[in-house]
Amino acid sequence: MKNHKNIVLAIVVLCLSFCLKAQDVDSLRVKILQCFNESRFVEVIDYTKQALQLYEQADDKYNVAGCYNTIAGAYMRLGQYDEAIRNYDICTGIMDEIGGERAAVNKRYIMNNIASIYFDMEEYDQSEEMYLKCIELLGDTGTDTIANRDLATYYQNLSGVKLMKGEIADAVSFAEQALALSQRYNDWQEKIINRRIALAKAYHEAGRHDESDAELEAALTIARREKEIYFETPIFMLYGQFAYENGDYNTAEQHYLTALRIAKENHFNQFYLECLQGAYLATKTSHPERAIGYFEESVKMRDSIYNEDQQALIRDYQVKYQMSEKEHELELQQEKARQSSRLLSLSLLAVVLLLILVVVLVWNAIQRKKRNEKLARLNHTKDQLFTVVSHDIKTPVLAQEKSIDIICEHINDIPLNYLKDYLFALKSSTKELKAKIINVISWVKGVIGDTVNQTEPFNLSRMADKVIHSQAFEIGQKSLIVTNAIPEEWMGNDDIQIVEMVLQNLLSNAVKYSFANGEIRLEAEEGGERYLLKVIDHGQGIEKERLGKLLKRMTSSTEGVDGESGTGIGLFVSRQILERNGGIIEIESEEGVGTTVTMSIRKGEQ
């Protein structure tokens, strides 16, 4: 599935190359292509919509379809998949109206793009259905070289879908057919390398490790022969991944070191970061000192990559701020002139307005007092919110933006399987950022007081299982044992969204500050009309000085045992929303021994 993004750009260029002929649309064509190459996709959409209006006026259906295709491609790059699919569907409908071989080929390419979107959205059944439609539209390829190369691409894409669905035998079959077609019809060498890599993955998942290694070796031989250095790094990374999954950590480390050397020599920065992560995982158990070195190097590399762009972004904000200030000053001057004119014309009505003004002033005085009280609270909330946003939310947003920029800039060079890894990494980062934002929003709503608690009965033990399952990845990363000792028959009757969110925070903190291979325990006991739910860990504990501050005010985030980040407001938010809900939260901790956090939940009927 490596080339689906390239196909988008190719179709965009193809459609625009023979569609924009009039002088006005000719100018738009240049702007669209320039913005597409510079990844300015919002402007691509704007300019293409302008061209679309001109073609609709001329009743030029083929170029109208080309505009919808271009808009869909831009939305696809922006990650707005629903809009992308909607515009692709419009384009497909127009192609059906036009008919003919040329329209059929374009329709097939559009369906391939839609299938790729469904794959990225993890809707694998729909993705598979679209790829099968592509094959159906392709029909009997016969000896048509180009058509058979396209068929090889669809088979490889289907292999990727089957792997994600766990249908390993089908994944192997499609990957084998894809390679056979590419070899038979003299496909590009880089595509043959991709086919062999895809087949190696399928063989590995099928447990056919010798054949998997053979395919990787063949891919590496071709890459070296054709001087395709870009492919050598991901091939050695796969060697490392497979060795790691087979438990051969020393061999995994050696492969990642080879990949590191190639990536460093050729300035493949994103690969270099991934190799450092792989080497870290391979050594963190057997050689922790080396693992620390790899981790520190990855941190330095990230800082080096992102720092320049962050500085540029700051400068850009400064320029925009200065321009905004000047525009504001001009508006003030214009407003003063308008006010002077209005005062002159309204002078005759001054006596009547004076009486009205007295009434308005009295009313305003009453309202101002109420507003000032609320404003003082909101200003305090704002200051705290800015602290969180600037420290804990801005940084991952900038990092995600940079990662997306890297993907967009190198989209034509990145193998599909590694593009997928980048996107999954972004997805994981986005989920983490989403959790932070939800915390902030929940806290702000709690302070402002515009939320209404909705109580409902729920099983306390099953709710805890759900929270534990949601953090299974983080728990597995540290090899923790999390025990749910809450009686299975106990029922709560509370706002389950609040309870889940608070418990998520408490368990996340316990995981963050627990040592590898440690234990976390969830318990509950009777507490009058409430249950007292406890999250107990045996991690690094909390300093006495910091323990006294945690529940009283928002504090800055501290790193976990393995350098994990946090929102820095979890316990503060939890206390506020629990107290507003009539509950409590308490912390007992001893540095170096562990922490017990207790929250109260309303009882339900048993």
Image (cartoon, rainbow, N blue to C red):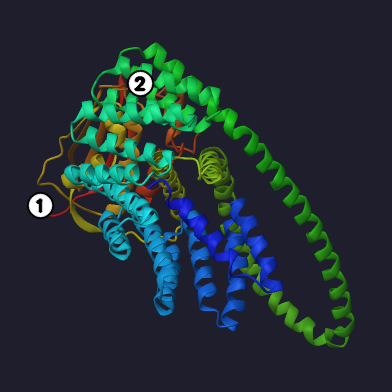
Residue 132: quarter of image? bottom left
Q: Nearer the viewer, mark 2 or mark 1?
A: 2
Instruction: Tell me which residue sits at (67%, 61%) in the image.
Output: 30
Q: Position of residue 522 (x, y in %)?
A: 21, 35
Label 2: how many Cα within 10 Å (few below 14, some 14–19, many 20+): many
Q: Position of residue 78 (x, y in %)?
A: 50, 55
In the figure, is residue 230 to the left or right of 525? right
In the figure, is residue 358 to the left or right of 235? right
Q: What kind of element bears circle 2?
A: loop
Q: What kind of element bears circle 1?
A: loop
Q: Position of residue 87 (x, y in %)?
A: 45, 68
Q: CA distance from mark 2 to mark 1?
A: 37 Å
| Residue under pointer 2 | 540
| Residue under pointer 1 | 606
Q: Amino acid at mark 1?
A: Gln
Q: Is residue 540 above or below residue 421?
A: above
Q: Position of residue 194 (x, y in %)?
A: 37, 39
Is residue 56 something one can see in this rendering?
Answer: yes
Instruction: Tell me which residue sits at (37%, 53%) in the image.
Output: 145
Tell which of 183 and 393 is nearer to you: 183
